[in-house]
Amino acid sequence: MQDTSKQYDAIINTCKNLFTKKMSDYGSAWRILRLPSLTDQIFIKAQRIRGLQENEVRKVDEGEVSEFIGIINYAVMALIQLEKGVVEQPDLSTEEATELYEKQVAITKQLMEDKNHDYGEAWRDMRVSSLTDLILQKLLRVKQIEDNKGKTLVSEGIDANYQDMINYAVFAMIHLGE
C-alpha cells in the first residue's frame, strides 16, 4: 500500500497545482456554484471520458487524464462547498482555498487507505472503463440525493460519494500512468 500512497500523493499534487494556478487566474469564483452545478460539471467530465473510451475518433485533442483531473478538482470543490456553504461572491484567497483543498484530500485519502486495506487493493485489477462507470454511477446517486433534498434512508451521504469519485479518478490515473 505504500506504493499506492506515494502514487496517490503524486496525482493529487498534480491536481492541486492546477487548482492553485486556476485560483490565481480566476480567484474563487467557483464558490458561487451550488452542489448540483458542481455535480453536473463532474458529470460532463465523466461522460466525456466514457465517450473517449468508446469512440475511435477524437475531435478535441485532450485525453482522459485532464478530465480525471477535472473530476478530482470539482469533487474537492464540492466537498468544500458542503463544508462552507455557497456564497454570493468569491470569498477565499488562494492560500485559504488551498488549505481547504488539502484538508478535504487528507480526509479522502484516509478513506481510500481504510478501504484499500479492507478490499486488498482490488482496484488494481479493475479496468479504467469500470472506474469511469463507477464514477458515473456515483454521480447518478448524488443527483438522486440532491433531488431528495439531501435526504437518504439507509445510504451514504453526498460527501462519501464525492470522496469515492476522487478515489476512483486517482486510481484511473494511476492505471493510465502505468
Image: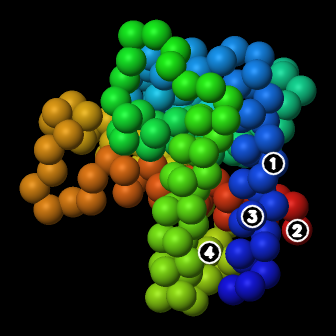
Marked residue nearer the N-terminal end (1 or 4): 1
Report if the CB atoms under discs 4 and 3 are less than 8 Å apart.
Answer: no
Marked residue nearer the N-terminal end (3 or 2): 3
Residue 76: give x, y in percent of width and height.
54, 43
Q: Which residue is mark 1?
A: 14
Q: Residue at the location (78% across, 81% down)?
A: 3
CA gap, disc 2 and disc 1 = 16 Å
Please rate how many residues cluster around mark 4, counting C-alpha atoms within 10 Å: few if below 14, some from 14 to 19, many from 20. some
CA gap, disc 3 and disc 2 = 15 Å
Q: Residue at the location (72% across, 54% down)?
A: 12
Q: Is 19 or 144 nearer to us in this picture?
A: 19
Marked residue nearer the N-terminal end (3 or 1): 3
Say what secondary structure mark 3 lies in: helix
| Numbered badge on residue 9 | 3
Report if the CB atoms under discs 3 and 1 are less than 8 Å apart.
Answer: no
CA gap, disc 3 and disc 1 = 9 Å
Say what secondary structure mark 2 lies in: loop
- Picture quadrant where residue 160 is located: bottom left
Q: Which residue is mark 4?
A: 123
Please rate how many residues cluster around mark 3, counting C-alpha atoms within 10 Å: few if below 14, some from 14 to 19, many from 20. some
Q: Amino acid at mark 2?
A: Glu
Q: Amino acid at mark 4?
A: Trp
Q: Which residue is mark 2?
A: 178
